[in-house]
Amino acid sequence: MAQDRLKPLRSIFSSKSGTFGSIIILTLFGTALAVAIFGKSLVPYDPIQQDVGPILGAPSMAHLFGTDQLGRDVFSRVVYASVNDAYVSVVVIGASLVIGALIGSYAGFRGGKIDDVLMRITDSFFALPSLLLAMAIAVALGPGVIHMMYALIVVWWPSYARMFRAEALRISRLGFVEASKACGTRTWRILARHVVPNSLTTMILYATLDIGTVIIVYSGLSYLGLSVAPPSPDWGEMVAEYQSFMVTAPWLPIFPGLVIALMVIGFSLFGDGLRDILESTR
Amino acid sequence: MELLTYFLRRLALTIMVLFTLLLMTFILTHAISSNPLVAWLGRSASLHPELAALYAEKYHLNDPIYVQFGYYVWGVINGNLGFSAVRGQLVSAAIIQTLPNTLQIVFFAILISLGLGLPLGILSARYSGRYADNTIRAFYLAGISSPAFFTAILLMLAFSFFLHLLPTGGLISPDIIRPRAITNFPLIDAILSGDTTAASDELAHLLMPSLALALTVFGFLVRVLRNSMLEVMQTNYVRTARAKGLTENDVFVKHALKNSLMPVVTLIGLMVTWLVTSSLFVETVFSYPGMGQLVVQALSALDYPIILGATIVFALIIFTANFCADIVYAVINPEIRLGG
């Protein structure tokens, strides 16, 4: 049973885009993990140390991505900032999965008023772009990576609740769940034993693809200056900061921007590969 | 009749959701935020308590939050979105100034995405799995994966700084006089007043922001159209058409295309959501005086009335777009009305 569930994940490498996507994702998340463990000693220069190179220096062997207006090494900054995006995206998706599983499965399984209320709430969340709503929350909470995470979780969980609800509805009509209900098993037990585990495969696949979307929205909030406080580096914030040097040093905003795009492309390719596999097994 | 019921039910749902939304954004910005009096009056708030009291009185800041919300909803219904003390003008006035500019680039962005997305989607489906399909896929993936601000910066670097083809930003060149406002839409005004210099200059300023917006969304169109066409190609009537001896191109254009366009209609509604979101970034990069820029400025000034007002207007635009898409979809696809 467990093997069957993991099959799509294992055969991802049989598709070309899936392989490319996986390589990009593993490289970047691996980097983030390494930075999280080893900290500043991993990168060639201290990311916030000024004057380690020339002011607005072009990319060179010593400074792969060049140096910025304060003589900081951009490569070190970009690598060091990978932690934020990996951290935020994984936590936001993880939290949404958990909240969505709890609320969505219960609502779908029990139906009635709870279900109605949940659907109306998610309707409202769907009506507004997640970025705008996250922005409003972020402004209210004040800047900071943790606050940004709260803001994103608030706007992110409803879609998971909705999908878990749909899955729970489907599963609750299956024979073995009906049988369990007839035996008088308690609701929470049926949810924990049958409903949630059986919706998990679909949901985890979806969640993997969704990480790319979180990264793009987070980088947008960061670009608007709602995330880290300078001088800590963050990809979106770096693009915003370096944008004004675009004429004299075009590589400055390009490198961090490119890394965001690359990361998201990784997830898109991974998703394409996944979709191909799911369609071929159907 | 059936369509009317569907229409009314859809309208009721929209109004209900809009109300919930108003409640959410209102509570958020008011309950958790720092004191708006400080943001509006600065140090004068503590230096002149009587002034602060006057402001608090005028904007009902001393009333319980539900009463404030009541005032707010009543105001919104009457077209009054409050007053922005930071800008010193009515929120509705600030929005009327900037909204047409945003609608202009969103309109052109939709045109460009359709112009790019439809042909590429058809090509992609026609040559699925082959070289053309993969190239198109790479192109649109790069587009939808890049954050809007990055796409905008790349375009600006390419077209303004390297090729010197297009202006770097703004609504109109500073040396050109803006034609008299008739409709508030700058481009339409320029055309109505017969000012071709202004019109072409404004068009040049519009191109890059619209293109940047279009590049971030056209990929969804390609993907949906391609998959929808491939699905239609599996149907029996396409097989019949092939059996009749039609050429592959005829099958594509005459049979498959029309039936594949339905999901695209729904998608255009969704695209507006994406475009409105991206306008924040694109307008900031190009210093284009639209609603996106208005919101970004309001963010740094803690200008809550503007943030609230703009959120409502953005939501209204998105609702209207999705509403229209749903109605069009219901008209062209009778199946949906039965299920509703």
Image (spheres, rainbow, N blue to C red):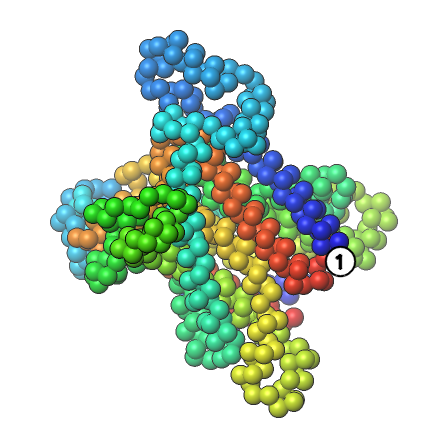
**Left or right of residue B309, residue A178 in this image:** right
> Which quadrant is the C terminus of chain A positioned in?
bottom right
Q: Chain of mark 1?
A: B
**Left or right of residue B159, residue B124 in this image:** right
Q: Is residue A241 visible?
A: yes
Residue located at (39% from left, 44% from top):
B182
The residue that mark 1 highlights is B338
Name the element at disc 1: helix
Q: Which residue type carries mark 1?
A: Leu
- Above or below, A122 against B55 in this view is below
Q: Position of residue A186 (x, y in %)?
A: 79, 42
Residue located at (65% from left, 45% from top):
B11
Q: Residue furthest left?
A: A54
Of A240 and B220, which appears nearest the observer?
B220
- Above or below, B90 against A213 in this view is above
Crowding near the residue tagged with mark 1, few <14, some 14–19, many ≥20 C-alpha atoms within 10 Å: few
- Above or below, A18 against A178 in this view is below
Q: Position of residue B272 (x, y in %)?
A: 49, 52
Residue located at (35% from left, 39% from top):
A225
Q: Is residue A156 visible?
A: no
Residue located at (58% from left, 67% from top):
B261
**Left or right of residue A207, residue B157 in this image:** left
Q: Position of residue B204 (x, y in %)?
A: 30, 57
Of A235 and A191, which appears nearest the observer?
A235
Of A245 and B11, which appears nearest the observer?
B11
Picture quadrant of residue B292: top left
